Amino acid sequence: MDILSTLRTMGALGMVLGMLAGALWFVKRYDVKLPGRVTNTRRKRIEIVERLSVDGKRSVALIRRDGMEHLVMFGPEGQATIESGIVAPEPPAPELAAEPVPVANLAEDIAALGANFARLVDLPRLAELPRAVAARAATAAARNAHSPRAPKRVREQRNTTRWNRAAVRAALDA
């Protein structure tokens, strides 16, 4: 029993360390912003507006100080100011009288969804239709050519990428 409890303890420790390593990898890989320290409510004079990772070692940050923005690149060799003295855009004024939100009509939404889905499903078939007609016309022309030896029929590969982004956008925008 003593060995089993030791193995169970080591297994639990390994799982906890594995979960911590997975969480650290996730934060680094997807550049997750973790919440910072809670400070007092007075207005800050300096803040990072946006940060973009250029590659594994370098990043670019847009820093706002007293209404002016500065673009700075950080890397292992140090930091470099790319552009300085950018005038910060003014935040949009809040609208006082907002338009009322339209009430959703479930029956109309379901009908529109059904029509769009039907077009989306038929889209790959419609895209393959001209190729099939052209292939049939080519085989018919080869039969009517009266050549002593007909050319060997080459089978065209099927397009297996049915759901690509461009087709989905085109179907939904139409």
Image: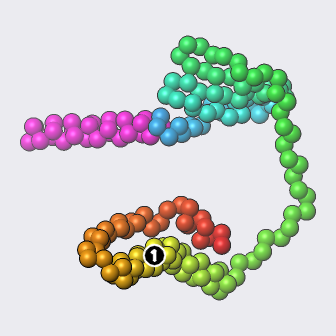
Residue 12 x/y as whole percent: 26, 41
Q: Residue at x 54, y 81 (%)?
A: 118
Q: Give the residue at the far right of this rendering.
A: 96
For the stretch drawn in magenta, the main secondary structure is: helix
Front residue of 23/7: it is 23
Label 1: how many Cα within 10 Å (few below 14, some 14–19, many 20+): few
What is the magenta range?
Answer: 1-27
Question: Residue at horizontal 91%, vertical 62%?
Answer: 97
Q: Is residue 34 left or right of residue 158?
A: right
Q: How is the image coloured?
A: rainbow
User: Where does the image place residue 51, in percent across and percent down from the top left?
Assistant: 64, 32
**Is 6 or 170 nearer to us in this picture?**
170
Tag 1 secondary structure: helix
Q: Which residue is mark 1?
A: 134
Q: Is residue 1 left or right of residue 95?
A: left
Q: Is residue 121 visible?
A: no
Is residue 106 covered in magenta? no
Which quadrant holds the N terminus?
top left
The number of numbered discs placed on residues in the rendered structure image is: 1
> Front-most of 37 and 94?
94
Q: Is residue 87 visible?
A: yes
Residue at x 65%, y 69% (from the top left corner): 173
46 relative to 78, above or below? below
Q: Give above or below for 171 relative to 94.
A: below
103 on left or right of 156:
right
Q: Could you say where residue 59 lies in the image, as x and y percent from the top left?
A: 59, 27
